[in-house]
Image (spheres, rainbow, N blue to C red):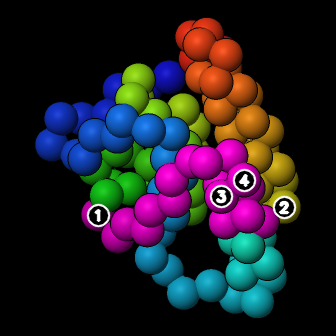
Amino acid sequence: MAEIPLECQQFEEVTVVSKNDSLSLVETNYMNRVIYAVDKRKAILEYKSTSFFDCINQSDVDLVLINSEGLWGGYELTREGVDQLLTELDILTLQQSYGKGTSR
């Protein structure tokens, strides 16, 4: 898990951050999966500019998973990337709901 630089926003809750980019129809379908999953797991979804992604050294990804301990991972807005994000979101939220650490 990577530290988020202090000059970037810090997060206390499990949060998925997405770029403010316009999406194609296929990407919109993938994003709808993310929105549904975040809502079901009582996580937070935020939209940020590319400058935020630059600040956390994740300019090459579309989505990041963050919690109070730092950056959990970066993901592309593709079927494989969303599948990986949702799997790791499950792991992170389950571990936190059972009071365990968030180490991989």
Q: Residue 72, position in %: x, y?
A: 54, 32
Q: Earlier in the sequence, mark 3 or mark 1?
A: 3
Q: Which mark is residue 51?
A: 1
Residue type indicated by callout 3 = Asp
Residue for badge 4? 40
Query: In 3D space, how far apart are the residues under numbered discs 2 and 1 (Cα atoms)?
Result: 25 Å
Residue type indicated by callout 1 = Ser
Element under label 2? Answer: helix
Crowding at dot 4, Cα within 10 Å, few <14 / some 14-19 / many 20+, comes out as few
Q: Which mark is residue 39?
A: 3
Task: Indicate the quadrant where residue 29 lies.
Answer: bottom right
Up/down of 30 relative to 96, above or below = below
Query: In 3D space, how far apart are the residues under numbered discs 3 and 1 (Cα atoms)?
Result: 25 Å
Q: Residue 52, position in %: x, y?
A: 31, 58
Element under label 4? Answer: helix
Crowding at dot 3, Cα within 10 Å, few <14 / some 14-19 / many 20+, comes out as few
Query: In 3D space, how far apart are the residues under numbered discs 3 and 2 (Cα atoms)?
Result: 19 Å
Q: Residue 74, position in %: x, y?
A: 57, 45
Q: Residue at x 37, y 66 (%)?
A: 48
Q: Are marks 2 and 1 in contact (CB under 8 Å)?
A: no
Q: Which residues are magenta?
A: 33-51
Residue type indicated by callout 2 = Arg
Q: Residue at x 54, y 87 (%)?
A: 22
Q: Residue at x 44, y 38 (%)?
A: 13
Query: In 3D space, how far apart are the residues under numbered discs 4 and 2 (Cα atoms)?
Result: 19 Å
Residue for badge 2? 79
Can residue 65 be spotted in the picture? yes
Q: Earlier in the sequence, mark 4 or mark 2?
A: 4
* Viewer-side label of 3, 2: 3
